[in-house]
Image (spheres, helix red, strand yellow):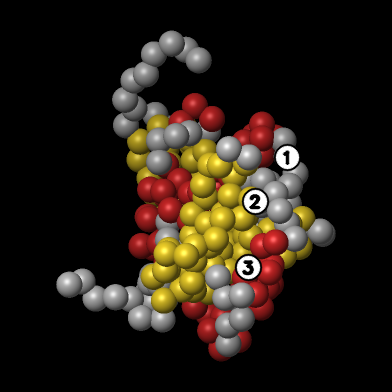
Amino acid sequence: GVGYVAPILCTMRGLGESDIEQAVVFHKRISDEIGDADFFAEENTIAESIMGEGVVVGVFAEGNLIALRAVSYVKEFVDDAVVDLDLDPGEADHVAVMDFCVTDSSFRGNSIQFFTYLFTESLMYPNRYHLHTTVSPKNIFSLTNVLKCGFSAIKFKQKYGGHHRFVLYKNLRKPGAIKTRGHKEILLRNYDYHPKVFADGFVGYKIKHKSNGMAMLYGKPLEEVPSKV
């Protein structure tokens, strides 16, 4: 809204103990600005993740924090993810819960979420390769971003005290392919339909803007990724 655009040098790094206070204040400010509790129904503590039970990445512009991405390895949340993803409990030490990504409003639209995700992925792999996250069907921006990062929607359920959530999964060891021919398109607001489509073996792979609302595109996962001809 200031009437001009200008390039600003940004730096990205993993956060440490001395960053906790700034990170907590920044997260609260952005959450308060967005103001929809359904977007942020439950946050794992930033401090726990920074102190070793996860990873927190920050993006700084001129010394100020402008974006924050947190990943949690806290047992309580990992155990919940193991159930969501139908994994063997023995895989728990390889699970990462993608907690949240918040960006200063003046820097949104610059693919910062995507870059922070790629950087975070490089910090987690090869130890953590089962990636789990949940996103509100109302949060179209985050859903679009998470799907672009290679996640697939695999379930639709009520979590965190009754809030509807898509459960999304990415396996860094086994990138999956999805058959898009014969795909289904289900409006995000049709909460009753999503579980039925998942039950039929489909996974969500993209958000599409339709004349009557935003829709999730569903396809069937391919067991074998076709080799390049």
Q: Position of residue 133 (x, y in %)?
A: 58, 62
Give the label on residue 89, or none: none
List the residue tagged with mark 1: 36
Q: Closer to us: mark 3 or mark 1?
A: 3
Residue, x 73% and y 47% (percent of image)?
A: 38
Q: Residues within 10 Å of mark 3 (few under 14, many from 20)?
A: many
Relative to 34, is 72 above or below?
Answer: below
Kindly identify the amino acid type of the residue bearing the numbered disc 1.
Answer: Asp
Residue, x 81% and y 59% (percent of image)?
A: 162
Residue lying furthest top = 3
The answer to the question of whether label 3 and label 1 lie on touching residues, with beta carbons closer than 8 A, is no
Residue lying furthest front = 182
Residue 33 placement: quadrant: top right
Give the label on residue 197, or none: 3
Q: Residues within 10 Å of mark 2 (few under 14, many from 20)?
A: many
Q: Position of residue 48 (x, y in %)?
A: 61, 60
Kindly identify the amino acid type of the residue bearing the numbered disc 3.
Answer: Val
Between discs 2 and 3, the one toward the N terminus: 2
Relative to 46, is 200 above or below?
Answer: below
